[in-house]
Amino acid sequence: MANKVRFAFTEVDPSLGALSTLPYLPLTLTYQSQSLNVSGLLDTGSSVNVLPYEIGLALGAVWENQRLSLPLGGNLARFEARALVINATVEEFPDVDLAFAWTQDKYAPLILGQMNFFLAFDVCFYRSESAFEISQK
Amino acid sequence: MLTTTQFVPMLRELSPSDKLLLLNFLAAELLREYGIVPLSIQDDLPRQGLHDSFEAAAVLAQALKEKQELTHG
């Protein structure tokens, strides 16, 4: 089993180069029998994980079946969000359950935040090297 | 259902205040349909961002607990 894995930051805008790099983590989400490879933005400033509407649908989740509604702040406040627990696999680490605020905003980014990504993984950022390391709790 | 050519003459018969109310009604309908918060009440919304959505975090914790109870009994 991997102890610590290092990732490079992702360049978002080639015209801006290193100025536009962000810590995106590749991971596999699995809901029931459906799996999807995605990238999530590591956001220590977000108190929750956020799942865009379309990704939830692509995983086969049914909006009407999720009964826990939750209030999001900021730009996502105007959209309804419901709790959705999804199994996630990062590299060779054992899979974990991540609880997402599944928002109806189709344009929301996939955010990995304090509840509960950063409770499941320890992350060390090396911004000057445009890299981060991740290990499982 | 009325066509545009049928109801435009009726709209012209409305008083200025009723025309304004109708405009207001249509704007509110469009804002609601597209999930847009009216500028007039944006200042009244709580200044909460994703950084302090703690109530949402508590709901997620509950969802995780329920999932674990289902899985492990």
Image (cartoon, coloured by chain):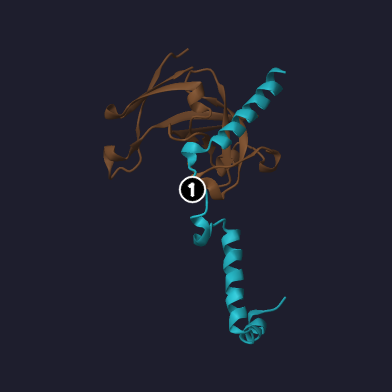
Chain colours: A brown, B cyan
Q: Chain of mark 1?
A: A
Tally of numbered discs: 1
Is A76 rendered above or below residue A113? below
Is A67 rendered above or below residue A77? above
The residue that appears at 48% across and 32% down in the rendered structure is A112
Is A83 rendered above or below residue A116? below
Number of other residues with Cα within 10 Å of mark 1, as a class: few under 14, some 14 to 19, many 20 or more: few
Is B36 rendered above or below residue B23? above
The residue that appears at 66% across and 85% down in the rendered structure is B10
The residue that appears at 61% across and 74% down in the rendered structure is B21
Please provide percent x and percent y for residue A38.
49, 34
Nearer to the camera, A70 or A133: A70
Task: Let me know if residue A87 appears in the view.
Answer: yes
Q: Is residue B55 left or right of residue A135?
A: right
Please provide percent x and percent y for residue A14.
30, 42
Q: Is residue B10 left or right of residue A73?
A: right
Q: Amino acid at mark 1?
A: Asn
Please provide percent x and percent y for residue B16.
58, 83
Q: Which residue is mark 1?
A: A75
Nearer to the camera, A54 or B15: B15
Task: Let me know if residue A33 appears in the view.
Answer: no
Please provide percent x and percent y for residue A48.
52, 34
Nearer to the camera, B4 or B49: B49
The residue that appears at 48% across and 42% down in the rendered structure is B49
- At mark 1, the secondary structure is helix
